[in-house]
Structures are given as C-alpha cells and as structure tokens.
Image (spheres, helix red, strand yellow):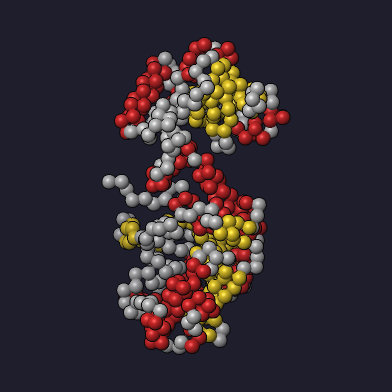
Amino acid sequence: MQDIIDPNIGNPAPTEQDMQEQMRFRLSKLQELSLAGKDPFQEVVYDVSCHSTDITENFEEMEGKEVRVAGRLLSRRGMGKVSFCDLYDRTGHIQLFTKIDEVGPDAYALWQKLDIGDIVGIRGTAFRTQKGEISIRTHEYTLLAKALRPLPDKFHGLKDTEMRYRQRYVDLIINPEVRDTFEKRSAVIREIRRYMDALDFIEVETPILNSIPGGATARPFITHHNALDMDMYLRIAPELYLKRLIVGGFERVYELGRLFRNEGMSMKHNPEFTTIEMYQAYTDLRGMMELAENLLSDVSFKVLGTTELTYQGTPISLKPPFARMTMTEAVLRYSGVDFNEITSDEQARLAAAKKDIEPAATFRRGEILNLFFEVFCEEELIQPTFITEYPIEISPLTKKTPGNPMMTERFELFIGGREYANAYSELNDPIDQRERFADQNKKREAGDDEANFTDEDFCLSLEYGMPPTGGMGIGIDRFVMLVTDRASIRDVLLFPTMKPIV
C-alpha cells in the first residue's frame, strides 16, 4: 500500500504554484462539505476519552474497549475498501484501521477525500492488526477542522531554520522532537516552582512597566504612558522591587517571568527572556551557592532522571558540589596575568595592551579585570563553576568583600562556557548604596547607556533597614537549552524575536 502523504514524494519540494493549486483543491472540498450541510467548522465539542499513548502503553487493559480520540491525520495508506491512517495527538500517534463495511459506503467515500493535516475525532475499538501493530478500528469519525494549507511532507519537511521559528505551529506538527523540547521546558519551570515552594519561598509579581530601569546593567526598551504623559521602561530585572519586599518582612521571595533588554540577538540572547530571581533574608552568597547547586541538580534529575548530561557532545555533570574559583584566580590560570600584582588603572591598561585587549577609555582596573575574564576564561569553564569576588566597578548592588574593598561578595555560575546564574550578598547599607548609584550616574554622563539609574525609593526603603540577604537570578532559557541539548536560545523559545519579512 502506498503512502499518500504528498503527491510529490521523491520529487523536489513543491513550488509555491503547487501549493496554491493544492489549496484551491482543498478549498473546493470544503465548499462541497458546506453545501452538503457538513461544514467541519461548525463542530465545537468532541468528547475525547483518551490519547494515543494511553492506548499503546496500556493496551492489555484497553484491548477490545471502545475509545474516542482526536487529532491530526499525518499519513494515509490504501485506496480500496480498507485504509490505514496515522493520527497524531498531543501525546504521540496511533494507527487507524478504517473499513468500508465498518463505517458504511457514504462515510467511507468522504473518509477517502480527507487530506493530510485534517483534524478528526474517532470512535472505535482498540485492537492489534495481523502485523502486530496496536491500532484503532474505526466505527465512526467526525471531521473537526479542515486543513486548507498542505503541510510539508515527511521527505522535505520544514527544514529552513528561520521558517521553523517563524511558523512554530508547523514546526510542532512536523517535528516531534520540537514538541518534546517544549514539554521539557514546561517540566523545568514546574519543577523549579515546586522546589522553591518546598523551601517556603513565596512567589510574587512585581511591575513590568518601570518608571526607571534598574536592578541590572543593560539597555532598556522605552515606551510612553499617554495618561501620565511620561516615558516608562520594560523591566530589565525585578531585583529592586523584590528587595523592597525583604525590607517589608517577606523573608523568602521569588519571581519567575520575562525580562526585556534592548540589546543584540544571538544564539545566546533574545530581547525578551525568562529568569527566576530569588531573595532570602539572613543568608549570603554562600547560601545562594548551595541553593543553586541543589536546585539545578534536583530539577535535572526530576525532568531527565539524571544529573549527568551531554551538551553538544560534551559531558556535563550537575552533581554537587560545583567547583569554585575567584575571578582573579581564573584570570591568572587562563591568561597568566596576576591582578593581585596590579593595583592601578594604568597598570591594568598596560597589562591589557600586552595581551592585545583594548578596554574602553573610561574603564578602570576592575572593569579591565572583568574584560580579561570574558576574553580568556569564560569559554574554558565547561563543568559547573562558581566564579567569585567580582570587581566593585561592575557590581553596584553588592556588598564589598571583607578585607578587600575593591572586590564584592558576588558569584556567577558558568556551565559549558556560559553564564547561568548571578548572585550577591546584597548591599543593605543605604549610605554605600547611594555612593554606588552616584558612581553609576557618572558612568551614564560619560556615555554608558547601560549604567544603573539612581532609584530614590529603593534607597529610601534601605533606610528603614534590610536584613542581611542573599539574592540570585538564574536564566531559565539557558538551563532549558542545557537539559534539552539545544544549541540556540531560539530552539527553546516558542516564538523568538524575528526581524519582519519585508
């Protein structure tokens, strides 16, 4: 029996003219159905009793029982008095066995006119064919929606990467592994919430529209509020609002949601992305390290059944404890430059020149140290590694390292050469915080569009007293990339940002 998915099997991909001709043919079928009083778009409810995998995984219990399933036809075989089809639903697929004697001549004639992509409801009996394949013997069917546009066939598929992102709905129909990726994404988010809730954290919601951008170093999106006649900003981070809640007495809070940064796009970056930020009173960055290790390993195990992953061909172990290294130690190890011996901005510039690094004119020692780290170290950090003691120049919301006021109590977690988490012992000294904001203002005046604004209300909240607090943000999209072994962030976003087709 011949597979009749598409008349162009084995031939070059259908042209636009071919597609238009097929659409006209399908539209004529819809018109025939409508004239016969069988418009499929009039059906509004279908009582589904089970899904395909319910039958295939529990066949001993289901055999011989009546079932009602619904889904999309993605293949048809046979043109005589018996036909075989594959019906796909959200759990998988199952074969349909449809016989003229079972459904009647008129219904069978209409069945033969159905197209690949049509959505149907099936009432039938679970059985096994002579070849041993678990199937449904069709007793009655209902056409629930007519596919007017042909799907890509199984040979040509939807292989153009950009078109897959633009037409994710088709991508999900044609490529089962894509659906699996997003089911795992949903499971990751669900397990993160479960883990945080079990630790007595409270999930909260803070404003997405902000009067000033704050909580991170990034360029914001700007919009305008007509009623207030003022510019507003899509949030780049919820940090300052969440810390206000710590001031107010919530000892453990988190928010999982979208952030927006008006920056470039790449395999690692999308202008809108998902993070979780969490704040816990009476702990510090060491408490956040323990939380990060346990959270990521637990979620990985719950979703995949293991903490031993392979990402793009490289084994990655999420089993705690993770490695730890200061930024200065990492720069010494991977560049050979010891910043413990560099005490001035000029010395840092000379060291950079010897390594062919060109820092911005306004960069100081700490910013140049961070530049060394980005150039020489990040891509070397394959197994999970906490990098600690970040320069004060790039950490305006973080406590100073005891005994070393040039550095801060901050870490970032790197896996596979990428940052996955950023955490602080949060700065709770209102006087120091104002001085840090003043320094950020100078950077803005010097042309740094990503420098922090001064948040006067946040400074006011600190004056009421914020307890010692540990805070952390984790990139959800990158973690999903890791557990699903996807190379690009666009592969784990249902609808990534795309440049419009002109």
Residue 294 visible somewhere in the drawing: no
Of residue 460 and residue 143, the one placed in the foreground of this image is 143
**Residue 225, image quadrant:** bottom left
Which x, y percent locates residue 501?
A: 31, 46
Is residue 319 depicted above or below 367 in this figure? above
Is residue 175 depicted above or below 270 in this figure? above
**Residue 207, image quadrant:** bottom left
Of residue 36 and residue 206, the one placed in the foreground of this image is 36
Quick one: which residue is furthest to the left in this view?
A: 502
Which x, y percent locates residue 261?
A: 40, 61
Which x, y percent locates residue 498?
A: 37, 50
Residue 274 visible somewhere in the drawing: yes
Of residue 348 and residue 279, the one placed in the foreground of this image is 348
**Residue 326, image quadrant:** bottom right
Which x, y percent locates residue 365?
A: 42, 82
Quick one: which residue is furthest to the right in this view?
A: 60
Is 279 positioned to the left or the right of 16 in the image?
A: right
Is 59 positioned to the left or the right of 279 in the image?
A: right
User: Looking at the image, which residue is at 49% across and 12% down?
Assistant: 106
